[in-house]
Image (cartoon, helix red, strand yellow):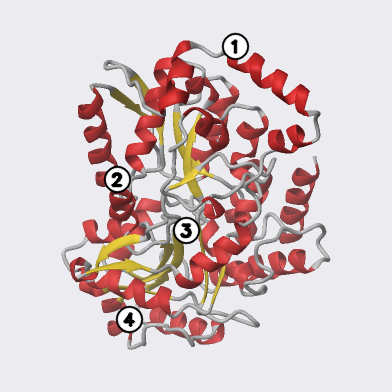
């Protein structure tokens, strides 16, 4: 039976946090000008428009030229759950228009983020980019290298018209909307049930406390298994996020420190201290400070580790990596202090951008708009999103009978969540948070102090 997946508390929270960000600076500026000046400027702009622009603006139709090559960069790579769906969507678009996609997608780790920013700085940015819409996008937004949704709609009025405008995130750099959201995410703790069973422990749940979790981890370690599969060398951000969340609340988590001594600064220090404690107790993968993310993930799949914290996108990767999906579930990351375990991290953190380079090229412009338009249809978003939140006006169309046991477990988790917050790390750029994220192995081994790492982040943010 087809059902709409109601994002309930997720959608309400995100809508509330994003409401009121839709007006652009250009609109504000026009409101303060005499009518004659605005009319004159609009007249001049009209005279300078190319015939192709005038035609598109009048009809809103796409004139995609066969043979166009579109350079596209996304995070649909590696073990991301929608890699095949993305490749299939690309193929359909290529066949529909007789065009070619030159794809340079990569796994969404810190290395990939650095590469994207470097490409923009070198003038080698793609035509279409699926990327984060928080502070990670600030460098290329501030450089004027991507186009606002308002500008795209001035030529193609129906662009992203199936999305709730109030749920389209605004860029922190200028408050304008650039990225069309595709689908959202949640983060949780995946569990290898057979490891827990062999170790004689229960799967953590909505009421499991941090102290109880530490006891569970010790029991698993004593039974000869790794409690937590994690690469602090490559993917430290999940444990960073939840560890500081345990010293925050849903209302205060999405913030960054102004000093070591303010509430956020103390939460960051305490959270990093908890990660160091987990490392010193031997609860992480033995090679956590040198391992690739794929290595520790495989150890989790192979039944060598009990827990693996990641996002909703990982469900597909788990399903592809095992023949026994029923052996895996997903649950809440245990909580501490004022944070309940059932207080989760979720949001619409990524979206589709069109670069200025593509927009200024008549052939690339139409191809880029058509590519994203095909990607964000209700049907396609539903295919990609499954149990995740979206900004679709009509909501996701979901056949729950077709879901595997892991996906059904995720629905139960989301529906029983008590609080939601965005990720705090999204408030920092990759360069700003590098003293922590790039040096987590040094932090947990003590060669870099927690206070010094946070202080360096603060210095980077104040530059």
Question: Is 45 situated above or below 85?
Answer: above
Q: Could you tell me which residue is drawn at 80 percent across and 30 percent down?
A: 33
Q: Of the two numbered discs 3 and 4 on the same chain, state the one appearing first in sequence.
A: 4
Total marks placed: 4
Pointer 3 with pointer 2, Cβ within 8 A: no
Considering the image in quadrants, where does the N terminus appear?
A: bottom left
Q: CA distance from mark 1 to mark 2?
A: 44 Å
Residue 105 percent coordinates (x, y): 38, 36
Q: Mark 3 or mark 2, which has the lower sequence index?
A: 2
Task: Please tell me whether mark 4 sits on a helix, a strand or a loop.
Answer: helix
Of callouts 1 and 3, the N-terminal one: 1
Crowdedness near tag 1: few (<14), some (14–19) or many (≥20) residues, C-alpha within 10 Å: few
**Which residue is disc 4 drawn over?**
196
Residue tagged by mark 3?
A: 288
- Residue appearing at x 47%, y 67% in the figure: 284
Q: Quadrant of residue 331?
A: bottom left
Determine the secondary structure under disc 3.
loop
The residue carrying mark 1 is 47
> In terms of sequence position, does the residue under pointer 4 or pointer 2 come before the other?
2
């Amino acid at each position: 039976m087809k059902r709409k997946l109601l994002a309930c508390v997720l959608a309400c929270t995100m809508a509330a946090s994003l409401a009121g960000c839709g007006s652009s600076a250009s609109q504000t500026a026009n409101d303060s000008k005499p009518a004659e000046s605005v009319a004159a400027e609009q007249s001049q702009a009209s005279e300078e428009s190319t015939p192709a622009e005038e035609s598109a603006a009048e009809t809103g139709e796409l004139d995609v030229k066969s043979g166009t090559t579109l350079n596209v960069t996304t995070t649909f790579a590696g073990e991301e759950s929608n890699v095949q769906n993305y490749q299939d969507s690309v193929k359909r678009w290529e066949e529909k228009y007789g065009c070619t996609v030159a794809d340079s997608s990569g796994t969404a780790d810190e290395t990939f983020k650095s590469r994207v920013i470097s490409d923009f700085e070198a003038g080698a940015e793609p035509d279409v980019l699926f990327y984060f819409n928080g502070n990670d996008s600030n460098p290329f937004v501030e450089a004027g290298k991507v186009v606002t949704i308002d500008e795209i709609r001035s030529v193609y009025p129906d662009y992203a018209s199936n999305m709730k405008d109030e749920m389209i995130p605004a860029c922190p750099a200028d408050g304008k909307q650039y990225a069309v959201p595709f689908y959202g995410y949640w983060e949780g703790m995946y569990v290898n049930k057979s490891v827990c069973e062999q170790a004689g422990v229960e799967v953590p749940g909505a009421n499991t406390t941090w102290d109880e979790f530490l006891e569970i981890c010790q029991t698993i370690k004593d039974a000869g298994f790794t409690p937590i599969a994690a690469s602090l060398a490559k993917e430290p951000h999940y444990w960073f996020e939840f560890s500081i969340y345990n010293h925050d609340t849903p209302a205060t988590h999405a913030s960054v420190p102004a000093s070591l001594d303010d509430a956020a600064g103390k939460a960051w220090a305490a959270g990093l201290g908890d990660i160091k404690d987990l490392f010193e107790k031997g609860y992480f993968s033995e090679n956590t400070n040198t391992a690739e993310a794929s290595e520790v993930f495989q150890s989790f799949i192979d039944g060598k580790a009990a827990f693996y914290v990641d996002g909703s996108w990982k469900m597909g990767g788990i399903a592809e990596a095992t023949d026994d999906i029923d052996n895996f579930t997903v649950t809440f990351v245990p909580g501490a202090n004022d944070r309940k375990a059932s207080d989760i991290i979720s949001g619409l953190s990524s979206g589709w951008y069109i670069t200025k380079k593509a927009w200024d090229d008549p052939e690339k412009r139409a191809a880029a708009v058509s590519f994203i338009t095909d990607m964000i249809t209700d049907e396609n978003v539903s295919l990609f999103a499954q149990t995740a939140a979206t900004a679709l006006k009509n909501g996701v169309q979901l056949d729950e009978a077709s879901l595997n046991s892991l996906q059904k477990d995720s629905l139960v988790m989301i529906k029983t969540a008590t609080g939601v917050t965005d990720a705090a790390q999204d408030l920092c750029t990759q360069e700003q948070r590098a003293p922590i994220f790039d040096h987590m192995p040094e932090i947990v081994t003590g060669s870099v102090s927690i206070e010094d790492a946070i202080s360096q982040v603060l210095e980077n943010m104040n530059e």
